[in-house]
Image (cartoon, rainbow, N blue to C red):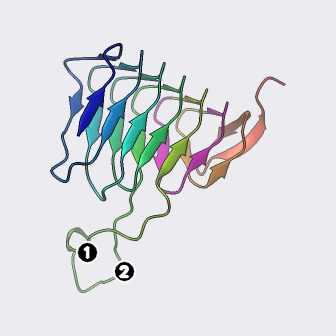
Amino acid sequence: MLKIDPTATVSPLADIERSVRGTLIEIGARTLVDSFVKIKPAGGSGEVIIGADCALNSGTVIYTGNGVRIGDAVLIAANCTLAPTNHAFGDTTRRIRDQGFQPSRGGIVIEDDVWLGAGVVVLDGAHIGKGCVIAAGSVVRGTLEPYSIYAGVPAKRIGPRGA
């Protein structure tokens, strides 16, 4: 199911696939989904809920997986990937492609007023606290403290926001 607020702007060059399982994909008020953003139902039945006043820039890919919840006023720079799922790979007698997915680590939660720099990768189980800034090229997993700046692979806290 696809719900787009009438005040949202979705580029005609964005690619939002409808789920064959009926997974909810919701885009909030005044949110901008730029060209070449891809939202793909894959790897689970989690919902994708994007809040109000967000901006998703070109080249960003969001998989539904175990669910993605994005708060209000979240800015996502170009070429970010939100992947709330993990392929199973433990059985060496079967191809990875044939093993399906590991159990959920809780999906992805991004609270309000967050900035993701270009090329950030956010993995299943990530919880990004309110007001965080994530440096370009970082890989996010686990819980990030509110109003903090993170950078690196994996992302580490490098200081408070506003200091």
Residue shown at the point (60%, 30%) measured from the top left: 112
The quarter of the picture where the C terminus appears is top right
Residue that badge 1 annotates: 99
Magenta residues?
118-134
Is disc 2 placed on a helix, strand or loop? loop
Q: Dot 1: within a 10 Å radius of its alpha carbon, few (fewer than 14), some, or many (20 or more) residues?
A: some
Query: Residue 103, image x and y in percent?
Result: 41, 70
| Disc 2 residue type (three-letter) | Gly
Q: Position of residue 142 (x, y in %)?
A: 61, 55
Disc 2 marks which residue?
A: 90
Cβ atoms under marks 2 and 1 closer than 8 Å:
yes
* Identity of the residue drawn at 75% across and 39% down: 158
3D distance between C-alphas at marks 2 and 1 = 8 Å
Magenta stretch encompasses residue 127: yes
Give coordinates of residue 150: x percent, y percent: 67, 39
- Helix, strand, or loop for circle 1? loop
Frontmost residue, 134 versus 31: 31
Q: Quadrant of residue 14?
A: top left
Q: Amino acid at mark 1?
A: Gln
* Image spot of residue 11 (x, y percent): 25, 17
Question: Count of labels shown?
Answer: 2
- In the picture provided, is 63 more to the left or to the right than 18? right
Which of the two residues, 12 or 99, is positioned nearer the viewer here? 12
Report crowding for label 2: few under 14, some 14 to 19, many 20 or more residues within 10 A (C-alpha): few
Residue at image position (19%, 18%) is 12
